[in-house]
Image (cartoon, rainbow, N blue to C red):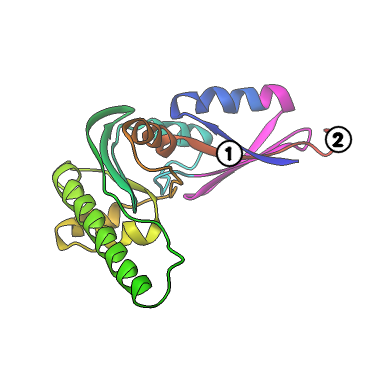
């Protein structure tokens, strides 16, 4: 059986040690983008290097890489809300969240439906404009090392099209976070999720 487990950067070294303790002697194949671990009993673990590429191609190098101090930006945008935060390590040091009302769908037809669609598009545009201004104020001057985004991909693309955010575009890295309407707690959790190490774990063949 294959499943995804998630651990914080501070727990990765202990997780790798525990993997070997549980499954036996472990060999590693490490590239700039991925670590693959195969244990004596056939258990496997795959880790895509977060915020790569990895420079020191070893398990120890990966641990050092994920523990490196980084200034992380998080940008969340949905039609109904937005959030931007700057994390120094795991600590949120600056943030802003907000919301804009965007009407839902309607079953009305004809001119009413067209007027409704125009109104809804205008509301969405106003929401994206508000998100852009927050990104410009919070993220643009923050000297980020990496930017993780979430919410609605089209909305994120719309915000990052602003010329004032040009310098942020090359900093965008996975994962793209699926989030509810951004509130403060959602933004705080997004920072945790953005830093988490995702491990694809495959049980040994005789695990059942």
Image spot of residue 46 (x, y percent): 61, 43
Q: Is residue 140 above or below residue 116?
A: above
Image x and y of residue 31, in percent: 52, 49
Query: For residue 10, which quarter of the picture?
Result: top left
User: Residue at 26% across / 38% down in the picture?
Assistant: 85
| Residue 106 counted in the magenta span | no
Mark 1 is surrounded, within 10 Å at the Cα level, by few (under 14), some (14 to 19) or many (20 or more) other residues, namely: some
In this view, the residue farthest toward the bottom is 110
The residue segment tinted magenta is 20-48
Tell me if residue 166 comes above or below residue 179 in the rendering. Answer: below
Whether residue 65 sits left or right of residue 15 in the image: it is left
Residue 89 percent coordinates (x, y): 31, 29
Q: How many marks?
A: 2
In the displayed structure, 124 sits above or below 19; it is: below
Depicted 127 relative to depicted 50: above or below:
below
Return the residue nearer the eye: 138 or 99. Answer: 99
* Relative image position of residue 198 (x, y in whole percent): 53, 39
Of residues 201 and 137, the one drawn nearer to the viewer in this rendering = 137
Q: Determine the image quadrant of residue 40.
A: top right
The residue singled out by tag 2 in the image is 206
| Membership of 30 in magenta stretch | yes
**Quadrant housing the C terminus:** top right
């Amino acid at each position: 059986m294959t499943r995804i487990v998630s651990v914080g950067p501070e727990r990765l070294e202990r997780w790798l040690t525990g993997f070997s303790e549980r499954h036996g002697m472990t060999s590693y194949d490490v590239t700039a983008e991925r670590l693959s671990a195969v244990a004596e009993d056939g258990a496997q673990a795959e880790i895509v290097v977060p915020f790569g590429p990895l420079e020191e191609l070893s398990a120890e190098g990966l641990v050092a890489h994920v523990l490196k101090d980084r200034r992380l930006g998080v940008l969340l945008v949905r039609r109904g809300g937005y959030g931007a935060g700057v994390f120094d390590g795991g600590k949120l040091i600056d943030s802003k969240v907000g919301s804009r009302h965007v009407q839902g769908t309607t079953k009305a037809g004809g001119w009413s439906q067209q007027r409704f669609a125009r109104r809804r598009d205008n509301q969405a545009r106003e929401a994206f404009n508000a998100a852009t201004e927050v990104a410009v104020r919070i993220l643009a001057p923050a000297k980020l090392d990496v930017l993780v985004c979430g919410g609605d991909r089209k909305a994120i693309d719309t915000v990052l099209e602003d010329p004032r955010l040009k310098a942020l575009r090359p900093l965008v890295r996975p994962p793209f976070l699926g989030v509810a309407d951004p509130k403060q707690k959602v933004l705080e959790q997004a920072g945790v999720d953005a830093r988490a190490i995702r491990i694809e774990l495959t049980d040994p063949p005789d695990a059942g």
